[in-house]
Amino acid sequence: MRNTRRKRPYQKRWVKFLPLTTVVLVCSLSLWHHSQLEALHSKTAATTIMPIKKTDVSAVDASKQRRRRGRRLDSFAGLNHTIAPVTVPLHASSGTHHVQMYIGSPPQRQTLIIDTGSRLMAFPCEPCRSCGSHASKKYFDPVLSTTDNMPTCGSCMLEGISKCSEFSTVGNVKGVKNKKCIISQKYTEGSSWTAYELEDLVWMGASDHKESIGMEYMKMAVPYVFGCQTSEKGLFRKQYADGILGLAIHESSLVQALYDARSINRLAFSLCLTRTGGSLSAGGIATEERHLEPIRFTPIARDHGWFALTVERVLLGSVCLAGCYSKDASPSSGVDYEDTVLEAFHGGKGTILDSGTTDTYLPQAIAERFQKVWSRLTVGLHYARRKYKYSYAEYEKLPSISFQFANNVTLTVDPESYMESVSTSTTLSRDPWEGTRELVNRIYIDEPTGAVLGANTMLGHDILFDIQGKQVGLAKADCDSEIYHGVVDTGR
């Protein structure tokens, strides 16, 4: 198992969060927005966030915080927020896609995995003596931020996830009693991390620090609660990314926070991924100009949690593997007339789009059929996940894999996406090559139930995760086009 190549922990609980800020933080944030917008109108972009007075949220009754949430949102009314989607660049490492997140004042940057399969944002914080070395080299230091607030026992914001630990010694901050809200996350392959709740201003940006603290990005800053990690084990200590940004469906998600703050006009985001990066757009899609086909929509099968889609058919090349009807089957098709494999795609978690998982995992119920048809279509090439040296003639025979969802929406995954070059300097394409290339198949057919469509199935598609409309939009797209320069007004 390679660095950052792991399955998400699917035994999760999705719970309701408490509100995010105190009245002092809200009022200060509103003043900050006004001052920054005035700077924008005068074409004098601000380079730092105005300090916000720290408040001991433990002194505020939790029930009062709940009632204040509505007033916090009202404080944003009338502000000149953009209503167009905001697009930020992504970069990829080892098949995993990352966004640059800016936190606090003055802002500190962290590189986070974009993960539609989870909903927490977390990364290491000072002091962390058991965390690894990651992309940013430095951990986030709460002491340096003038805008952070640390929830304590009695006012924990991640209700049902955090646990009150009055005697905890993790993440000690000078002058704060050890009554922290502790978060622990364990993963199926053995990795884990521990953190405590912290709230600060956050926004997504670019790799260029100066550009990211300009108004096009910084006006999207919102107060947000995340996990300040104090320990990492397993792959988390070794991975490239500093941490993770969960984007699953939940009222505590960052996209929801942006929508509540009226920084975006639709509760939605989109991903357009490539082998080297791509883009993330908050509030919708960046532009339809890069689409190679009309976008089509299929309903989301869950009200919260994962982006589960209803699979109606699965094809390998032109041969039906699941959702087959008698008219589709024939003695030469390699499938039976009676089809029950489709049920496996609907079991458990269902079939989910998970950008935080590098590869794609299909239910083991399809394995026999998949291997049989694969061998026939490739004229004798045995399906295997091990490395294999392919001639171009052999590579040309590899079939596409198509998933047909409800509303007759199809996601087709070509060999360029699911096959991976062992050499990091080689990018797969349909261009002929001499000799052989060592490749490995990143489609797995051993998931107990349900399916995980990972980042490799999303490559070359603009995918709109429309939470508000309870649907996912799919369109083949030129995701290499550079359209991410802050706000992109598409009129949507």
Image (tube, helix red, strand yellow):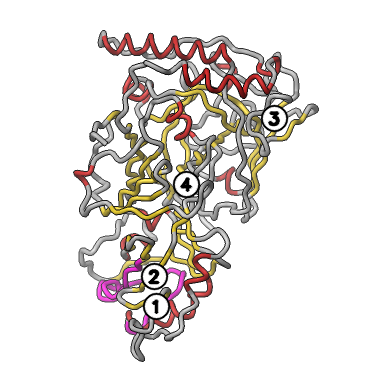
What is the secondary structure assignment of the residue under circle 3? strand
- Of badges 4 and 1, the one in the foreground is 1
Find the distance from the CA under tag 2 to the CA under tag 1: 7 Å
Q: Which residues are magenta?
A: 379-402
Report helix, strand or loop for mark 4.
loop
Tell me the distance, in whole angstroms, between the alpha carbons under discs 2 and 3: 45 Å
Q: Which residue is mark 1?
A: 324
For the residue carrying disc 3, how many other residues have a C-alpha within 10 Å: few (<14), some (14-19), or many (20+)?
many
Is residue 186 left or right of 488 when viewed as pictured?
A: right
Is 280 situated above or below 33? Answer: below
Circle 2: is it few (<14), some (14-19), or many (20+) Cα within 10 Å? Answer: many
Q: Earlier in the sequence, mark 4 or mark 2?
A: 4
Residue 374, horizontal then vertical, whole percent: 38, 78
71 vs 263, left or right, is right
| Residue 140 locus on image (x, y percent) | 55, 26
Residue that appears at 32% across and 44% down: 278
